[in-house]
Image (cartoon, rainbow, N blue to C red):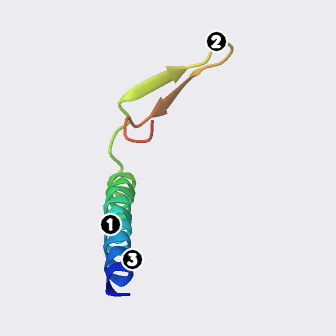
Amino acid sequence: GLSYAYRKLMEWKERDQGLIERVSFLGGLVDAFKEGLHADVQIKATDGPARLAHRAVL
């Protein structure tokens, strides 16, 4: 009945809030790449040259 409907609405609200937070985070990454922010980390493989990366990606 109403109790079940209320629980479902609360679940959807929590899920939606999580999705909003994820989209916001990914939007920030897109903005960083568009602005060409500098790489701040070098990743060195044992058998190859170092690669530049952004900390946010790691």
Determine the secondary structure under disc 3.
Answer: helix
- For marks 1 and 2, the one nearer the N-term is 1
37 shown above or below 52: below
From this viewpoint, which residue is outermost toward the bottom?
1
Say which of marks 1 and 2 sits in front: 1
Determine the secondary structure under disc 2.
Answer: loop
Q: Mark 2 sits on what residue?
A: 46
Q: Residue 32: x percent and y percent?
A: 33, 52
From this viewpoint, which residue is outermost toward the top?
46
Q: Mark 1 sits on what residue?
A: 14
**Residue occupying image coordinates x 37% and y 70%:** 11
The amino acid type of the residue labelled 2 equals Thr
Cα gap from disc 3 to disc 2, whole angstroms: 51 Å
Q: Nearer the viewer, residue 19 or 42?
A: 19
Quadrant where the N terminus is found in the figure: bottom left
Q: Residue 58: x percent and y percent?
A: 45, 35
Say which of marks 3 and 2 sits in front: 3
**Residue occupying image coordinates x 39% and y 76%:** 8
Residue 8 image label: 3
The amino acid type of the residue labelled 3 equals Lys
- For marks 3 and 1, the one nearer the N-term is 3
Q: Quadrant of residue 57?
A: top left
Q: Residues within 10 Å of mark 3 (few under 14, many from 20)?
A: few
Cα gap from disc 3 to disc 1, whole angstroms: 10 Å
**Residue occupying image coordinates x 64% and y 12%:** 46
**Residue occupying image coordinates x 39% and y 58%:** 26
54 shown above or below 47: below
Left or right: residue 49 compared with residue 47: left
Cα gap from disc 1 to disc 2, whole angstroms: 44 Å
- For marks 3 and 2, the one nearer the N-term is 3
Determine the secondary structure under disc 1.
Answer: helix
Residue 23 image label: none
